[in-house]
């Protein structure tokens, strides 16, 4: 899977473009820092032929 880093904050949160592992659709992957719970979330952003 191709993952493209969008932004990494000073507190350790990371946002990246990737494919949602459940739907295989392009999505923004958010990995919060450990002190925020560290639970990854996915936000789909389009159909199969966009972005990634």
Image: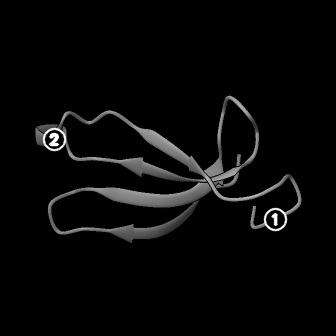
Mark 2–mark 1 CB contact (< 8 Å): no
Q: Nearer the viewer, residue 6 or 45?
A: 45
Side (left or right) of 38 relative to 6: left
Q: Which residue: 20% across, 33% down?
A: 37
The residue that mark 1 highlights is 50
Callout 2: helix, strand or loop?
Answer: helix
In the image, residue 26 sits, relative to residue 37, either above or below, namely below
**Which quadrant is the N terminus positioned in?**
top right
Q: Which residue: 89% across, 60% down?
A: 49
x then y, percent, for residue 52:
75, 61
Q: Earlier in the sequence, mark 2 or mark 1?
A: 2
Q: CA distance from mark 2 to mark 1?
A: 30 Å
Q: Which residue: 69% across, 54% down?
A: 2
Q: How many marks?
A: 2
Q: Which residue: 21% across, 46% down?
A: 33
Q: Which mark is residue 36?
A: 2
x then y, percent, for residue 34:
18, 38
x then y, percent, for residue 26:
71, 53
x then y, percent, for residue 25:
75, 46
């Amino acid at each position: 899977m191709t993952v493209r880093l969008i932004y990494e904050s000073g507190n350790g949160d990371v946002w990246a473009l990737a494919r949602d592992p459940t739907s295989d659709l392009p999505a923004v992957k958010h990995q919060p820092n450990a002190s925020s719970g560290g639970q990854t979330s996915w936000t789909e952003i389009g159909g199969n032929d966009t972005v990634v």
